[in-house]
Image (cartoon, grey):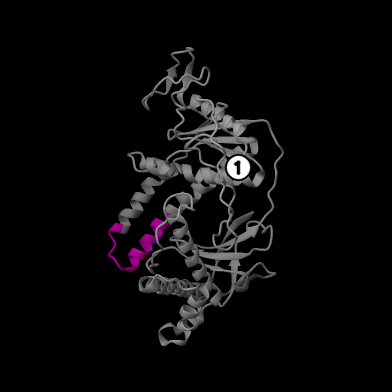
Amino acid sequence: MYLRYSFRIEPTPGQCVALARTFGCARVVYNDALAARKAAYRADKSRIATGALAKQVITEAKKTPERAWLAEVSVDALQSSLRDLDTAYGNFFASVAGKRRGRRVGLTRFKSKKENRHAVRFSRNGFRLRGNGRLNLAKIGDVRVRWSRPLPSAPSSVTVVKDPSGRYFASFVVEVEPVTMPSCDSEVGIDPGLTTYAVLSDGTTIDNPRFLRRAERRLRKAQRILSRKAKGSKNRAKARVRVARAHARVADARRDWCHQTASRLVRDNQAVYLEDLAVSGLARTRMAKSVHDAAWGAFRRVLEEKAARYGRHVGIVSRWLPSSQTCHVCWVVDGRKPLHVRTWRCGSCGTEHDRDLNASRVILAAGQAERLNAPGGPVGPGVEIPHQARPDERGTHPKAKPATTGSQTGIPTF
């Protein structure tokens, strides 16, 4: 499998200028290629081949006075920009044809130079790792890297990213072998929430860290200062960077917490079962800020990737499972309950339940039934097939074949 290892880099002022030039040239090539493809489609519904497109917007464009400055940057970065365009077009047509899972992908748009995040990718021909630990980028030079750990194998590509807060990162794509952890007997179901981030079926609770809520006061002050600066002024640009750094601290803390929590769950359990929440729908309610702060989607993605890497299982049960209405003792559906009801007594067996703990145990039983009845894939309607670990860089590595859905047999009704 392919993983991405990211490290902070510290370019010199001259290298920052060279990187800014590379970012701009890659954006111009991308926009020129997109304009050429749109013009060809409007003319006769044709599609320009990638080789002909590269010759038109890179090779021939360098000979013109308007685009002569394209020769100042690495051609490898410009070709990577065209490969990104090919990937975007492929995703669009696959989405229209129904071959791509997930939300519908729109037609690619032109890139703006006013964006605060910039990225450019170098293939094997555009970079090399020096013996002294420096990263050599074509026509940029040797850049200092803050190595926090060694790379497990030779990288196939590197993406240089400048985030809105002004930090530079080098993201390496490397191939690693899956590591199978020693098997264990424990399995756990997880019921996510907002007051408590998650309640596990074994009675363990995970507190909600609320990173955004805790940083709101500092963010509010920084954004208030930004709003009072004149547009286009240097003071406004400095204030924008301060706001971006405050948001970056929140995002970094949340990402680190998700990785640590997911690693602990994968290490301690052979199988983890989650509910397929409609996060995008919940993010449009009055709880939108808290839902975004909880980052359920990011946590699930990290959990699935770690499980695929270490030989664990992550099961996703249907979002239509009435986990909060079902008694995990007698499996009688006791009816809908408002959110303020945190404990309830089963009308059939008389067992008193904690709402979240009971839901996590119902999710555990449903996930185990799914896994037992359909080892080749989910059998219940509306159950999503868990993602396998996929390449972090689309368009560079061959795409995996789409998973197939197993036969529609029955599962226990809760």
Q: Callout 1: 10 Å neighbours few (<14), some, many (20+)?
A: some
240 within the magenta span: yes
Quadrant placement of the N terminus: bottom right
Horizontal and vertical percent for residue 302? 55, 46
Residue that appears at 47% across and 23% down: 326
Along the viewing direction, whichever of 193 and 133 lies nearer the viewer:
193
Along the viewing direction, whichever of 1 and 86 lies nearer the viewer:
86
Horizontal and vertical percent for residue 383? 50, 38
Task: Count how many numbered circles sit on residues in the image.
Answer: 1
22 within the magenta span: no
Horizontal and vertical percent for residue 366? 54, 29
Q: Is residue 375 visible?
A: yes
Magenta span main SS: helix
Residue that appears at 46% across and 13% down: 348
To which residue does mark 1 refer? 263
Question: In which image quadrant can residue 110 be found?
Answer: bottom left
Along the viewing direction, whichever of 19 and 55 lies nearer the viewer:
55
Question: Farthest right residue?
Answer: 182
Residue 144 appears left or right of 105? right
Q: Is residue 259 visible?
A: no
Q: Secondary structure at mark 1?
A: helix
Amino acid, disc 1: Ser
The magenta region covers 227-246
